[in-house]
């Protein structure tokens, strides 16, 4: 499933991916894909604009670091307001998902 | 502050970082795929494929950072440029008009900015004031040593006060190797530079010890003198130079660009060494200019209140009784002191050029309105397919912004060229040497002027609401717009009438100034001025001997023509005397408050050489110079004032309040002896052999010789008498001409503004009428087909023109009457509400209006009914 089809889903996935570990863009795509066992895929074309927008909104902070393989990459880290936003959207998402599931079962 | 370049670099840096980030992503994906077993080139291909459109992604990232309005603005700007390329004539006309308006405004701003707005080159310049007595003796406030010493000791309003000796005593001779160089030496108090907040570039400032009477002489050199005469060598500090036969130690060099507070020339500063121990009488005749720095919390008004008791006290002690009622205390800001006689002219020029800029705006607004009328359909379509009103207004404003910026850019070029011309043309007082240039402030002003203009003329078309019915292409929606355009034309007419009236006032005033009889004949008159040095010609006897010797030498110059010697000559005033000093034998004392009387020491040839008519009695005679009585000649106005209907000839008067009685031998015609416009009462005394004469002298020659030839002769003769005495030559017409420079400059500038303004008004009127004719072609055609005569049609068009012009003229007359009153001080011999000038302005304007209306009205009469009717 392409994550940009669902409003706010991409933002939440990015925030969640960064929850325990700072990561770069490629790392985030990999993380999402692996953890969702290939069900979810993050498009680069949506990821980077989203990362920059979120950085501008100060949900995440980016800086250039070196990876384990010795490559320069831009790493992103959650900020305090990013953590807050993540908590909010997780709650939100759970209730939406619950509602949707009920709706689907009803029919 | 961040510079625009740093900002740009940072922006570019950011953009390349975005690219780097995407590249690193690609590289990592490729690495990962390769590690998973794909061959290298296949891994690269797969990574790219997965990544999708990189350029698009980059654009999207960019869009996050670049603000929307900027993009919109650029898009609008591109659209505007494309639009203007389709109708280049309009764009070119608008841009050129704006360029001339903005350029002229910026150039004039460049001239008046240092005078009116810019900081003077001293720290906290607003605290600096000029202070002193103001009386009929001088055009500026002055002080005397005795009073100043009291003020300085007892005042409470100022942080500090300082003083300098005024200009007449400032000429001195610096020996440059063997030849004397006439330079300006100014004596200043030791704290002079400190009070101004200035420090020497090299060397040291004066100390209190230097300023003690009879202290070893020291000097500060001006930066230009140091450069030109000592090659900018710092080792000059501590060395001795010869100034007026005295060995003077150089203490230091003034900073580059140093300005004297009264803007006088100063090549050398020396301590003035005031001596408080001298008797009060001696110190109360020593003239000074005094300046002070206000305490931070004290205003000029408060300072005046605080100084007033002191002023009254010293007035009683130091000012001669007969003058006490005529002096008052003046404290004014240093800026006012500096620009005192050009302040009005500066404001007036700025006002005139801003009026011109306003005219330009009106004109461009008119052009854009015409264009908007033609594009009404386009705008209506855009509104119909969903462009918001704000978006449309913004686009129209962007268009005017594009025009204004292009015009402003070109205007900077115009300003540059105009400033260069102005620097050549402008009279001395209106230019601050080295500070009048096309600098950041002027450019900023040009930018601000362009943007303000854009707002002004852009508002007009933007306010017009696009209407749905315009889609039908009908012409009904135009009425309101033409009303607005008519008002614009009327406003243009009004403004240009004000400019025209002003211009004709200044031209008339200048004309009068040029042709007013001066009372003397400046043509073929050459002057040679010199000042004897006190040190060399100390005793009075040696001075008189020198003058006699020099006179004899100069008189024998072959072809020298008529010759005379005086201590001063018009048009500048002399060192005047109070009228109330004069006493007439066997008459009651004269009125006590008669102001000042001009006074000159002349040789017998003075009246013939100058071309001053003797009205009654006779001129001086050579034989009288050795005799005991010292004859006097009065000017006609002085004779009238002293004697009324009585015959002055043969009467005895005493001139300096003493009992030295002098017979009146003649009455001379009045001259313009205080500038070119003022006639002060004046008397002349014969240069007696035993008189104590002032050290300054002016030799006059009425001669057919070329100035250069005469100068050579005079130099030779003077060198024979005293080889170290410098002489300054000037032809009298040139001397007189200096007094006409400012009026000429003002008349020229305002005149050219008026001509340009008139042109703009004509173009505006023409534009609106043409538009009207085009719009009414159909109607005119119908009327012609129904039998209207071409004469009627033309009359109708012209009566439109007449109505708007008439309204404009009425408004313009009212404005002119209000505005010209303010420039009264710049006019000579013409009243501000001079009916002739106003009539001339109206006539020129009306004539122009008729011409501007003629072409469109002719076109209207040539409308072919058939063509007009088939049109739609």
Image (cartoon, helix red, strand yellow):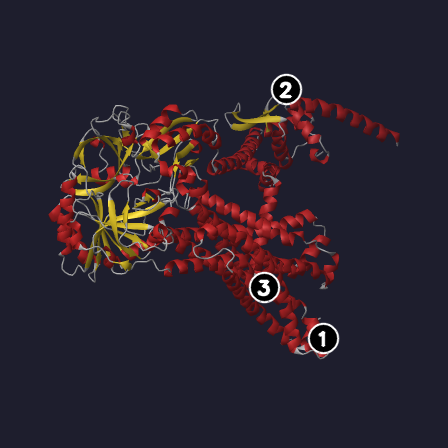
Name the residue nearer the viewer: B21 or B128: B128
Q: Is residue B77 visible?
A: no
Quick check: B271 left or right of B341?
Answer: left
Q: Is residue A13 above or below residue B334?
A: above
Judged from the image, the secondary structure of the residue bearing numbered disc 1 is helix
Q: CA distance from mark 3 to mark 1?
A: 25 Å
Q: Residue furthest right?
A: A107
In three-dimensional space, the C-alpha distance between marks 2 and 3, rounded to whole angstroms, equals: 75 Å
Q: Is residue B725 above or below residue B321?
A: below
For mark 1, what is the residue?
A: B782
The mark lying in front, picked from 1 and 2, is 1
Instruction: Indicate the position of residue B707 as horizontal and vertical percent values.
Output: 21, 57
The residue to which callout 3 is attached is B765
B473 to the left or right of B502: right
Asked which quadrant contains residue B142, the reply is top left
Q: Position of residue B191 (x, y in %)?
A: 32, 27
Mark closer to the observer (3, 1) = 3
Task: Please give the label number shown on residue A20.
Answer: 2
- Along the line of sight, the residue nearer the viewer: B459 or A8: B459
């Amino acid at each position: 499933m392409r994550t940009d089809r669902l409003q706010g889903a991409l933002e939440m996935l990015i925030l969640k991916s960064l929850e325990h570990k700072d990561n770069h863009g490629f790392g985030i795509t990999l993380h999402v894909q692996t953890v969702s066992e290939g069900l979810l895929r993050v498009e680069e074309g949506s990821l980077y604009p989203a990362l920059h927008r979120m950085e501008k909104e100060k949900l995440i902070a980016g800086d250039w670091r070196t990876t384990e393989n010795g490559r320069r990459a831009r790493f992103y880290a959650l900020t305090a307001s990013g953590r807050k936003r993540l908590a909010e959207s997780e709650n939100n998402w759970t209730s939406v998902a619950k509602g949707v599931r009920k709706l689907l079962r009803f029919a | 502050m961040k510079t625009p370049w740093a900002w740009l670099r940072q922006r570019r840096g950011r953009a390349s970082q975005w690219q780097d980030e995407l590249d690193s992503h690609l590289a990592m994906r490729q690495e990962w795929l390769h590690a998973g077993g794909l061959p290298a080139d296949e891994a690269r291909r797969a990574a790219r494929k997965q990544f999708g459109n990189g350029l698009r992604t980059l654009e999207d990232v960019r869009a996050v950072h670049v603000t929307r309005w900027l993009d919109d603005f650029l898009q609008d700007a591109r659209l505007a440029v494309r639009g203007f390329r389709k109708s280049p004539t309009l764009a070119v006309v608008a841009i050129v008009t704006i360029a001339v308006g903005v350029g002229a405004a910026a150039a004039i701003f460049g001239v008046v900015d240092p005078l009116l707005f810019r900081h003077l080159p001293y720290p906290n310049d607003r605290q600096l004031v000029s202070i002193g007595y103001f009386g009929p003796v001088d055009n500026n406030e002055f002080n005397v040593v005795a009073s100043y010493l009291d003020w300085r000791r007892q005042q409470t309003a100022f942080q500090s006060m300082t003083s300098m000796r005024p200009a007449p005593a400032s000429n001195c001779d610096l020996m440059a190797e063997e030849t004397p160089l006439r330079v300006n030496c100014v004596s200043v108090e030791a704290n002079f530079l400190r009070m101004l907040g200035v420090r020497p570039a090299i060397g040291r400032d004066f100390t209190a010890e230097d300023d003690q009477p009879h202290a070893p002489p020291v000097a500060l050199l001006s930066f230009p003198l140091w450069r030109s005469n000592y090659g900018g060598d710092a080792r000059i500090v501590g060395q001795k130079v010869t100034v007026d036969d005295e060995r003077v130690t150089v203490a230091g060099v003034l900073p580059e660009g140093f300005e004297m507070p009264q803007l006088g020339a100063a090549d050398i500063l020396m301590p003035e060494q005031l001596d408080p121990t001298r008797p009060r009488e001696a110190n109360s005749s020593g003239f000074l200019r005094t300046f002070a720095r206000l305490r931070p919390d004290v205003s000029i008004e408060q300072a005046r209140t605080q100084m007033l008791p002191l002023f009254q006290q010293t007035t009683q002690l130091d000012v001669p009784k007969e003058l006490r009622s005529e002096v008052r205390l003046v404290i004014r800001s240093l800026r006012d002191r500096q620009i005192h006689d050009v302040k009005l002219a500066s404001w007036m020029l700025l006002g005139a050029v801003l009026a011109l800029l306003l005219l330009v705006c009106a004109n461009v607004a008119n052009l854009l309105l015409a264009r908007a009328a033609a594009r009404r359909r386009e705008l209506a379509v855009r509104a119909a397919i969903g462009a918001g009103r704000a978006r449309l207004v913004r686009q129209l404003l962007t268009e005017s912004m594009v025009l204004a910026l292009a015009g402003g850019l070109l205007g900077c070029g115009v300003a540059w060229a105009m400033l260069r011309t102005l620097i050549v043309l402008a009279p001395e007082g209106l230019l601050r040497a080295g500070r009048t240039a096309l600098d950041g402030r002027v450019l900023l002003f040009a930018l601000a002027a362009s943007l303000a203009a854009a707002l002004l003329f852009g508002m007009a078309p933007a306010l017009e609401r696009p209407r749905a019915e315009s889609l039908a292409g009908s012409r009904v929606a135009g009425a309101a717009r033409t009303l607005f355009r008519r008002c614009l034309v009327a406003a243009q007419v009004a403004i240009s009438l004000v400019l025209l009236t002003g211009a004709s006032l200044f031209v008339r005033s200048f004309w009068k100034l040029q042709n007013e009889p001066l009372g003397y004949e400046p043509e073929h008159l050459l002057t040679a001025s010199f000042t004897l040095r006190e040190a060399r010609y100390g005793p009075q006897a040696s001075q008189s001997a020198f003058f006699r010797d020099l006179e004899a030498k100069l008189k024998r110059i072959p072809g020298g023509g008529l010759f005379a010697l005086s201590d001063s000559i018009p048009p500048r005033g002399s060192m005047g005397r109070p009228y109330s000093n004069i006493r007439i034998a066997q008459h009651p004392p004269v009125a006590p408050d008669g102001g000042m009387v001009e006074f000159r020491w002349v040789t017998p040839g003075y009246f013939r050489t100058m071309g001053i008519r003797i009205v009654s009695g006779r001129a001086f005679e050579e034989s009288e110079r050795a005799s005991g009585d010292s004859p006097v000649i009065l000017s006609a106005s002085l004779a009238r004032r002293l004697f009324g209907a009585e015959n002055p000839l043969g009467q005895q008067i005493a001139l300096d309040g003493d009992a030295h009685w002098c017979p009146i031998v003649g009455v001379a015609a009045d001259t313009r002896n205080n500038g070119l416009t003022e006639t002060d009462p004046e008397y002349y005394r014969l240069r007696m052999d035993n008189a104590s004469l002032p050290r300054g002298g002016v030799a006059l020659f009425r001669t057919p010789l070329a100035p250069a030839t005469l100068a050579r002769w005079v130099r030779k003769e003077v060198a024979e008498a005293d080889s170290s005495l410098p002489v300054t030559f000037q032809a009298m017409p040139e001397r007189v001409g200096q007094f006409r420079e400012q009026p000429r400059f003002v008349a020229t500038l305002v005149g050219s503004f008026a001509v340009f303004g008139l042109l703009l008004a004509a173009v505006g009127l023409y534009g609106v009428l043409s538009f009207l004719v085009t719009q009414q072609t159909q109607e005119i055609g119908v009327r012609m087909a129904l039998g209207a005569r071409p004469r009627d049609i033309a009359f109708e068009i012209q009566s439109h023109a007449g109505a708007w012009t008439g309204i404009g003229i009425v408004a313009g007359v009212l404005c002119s009457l209000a505005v010209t009153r303010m420039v009264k001080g710049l006019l000579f011999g013409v009243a501000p509400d001079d009916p002739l000038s106003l009539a001339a302005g109206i006539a020129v304007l009306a004539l122009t209006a008729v011409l501007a209306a003629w072409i469109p009205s002719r076109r209207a009469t040539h409308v072919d009914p058939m063509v007009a009717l088939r049109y739609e």
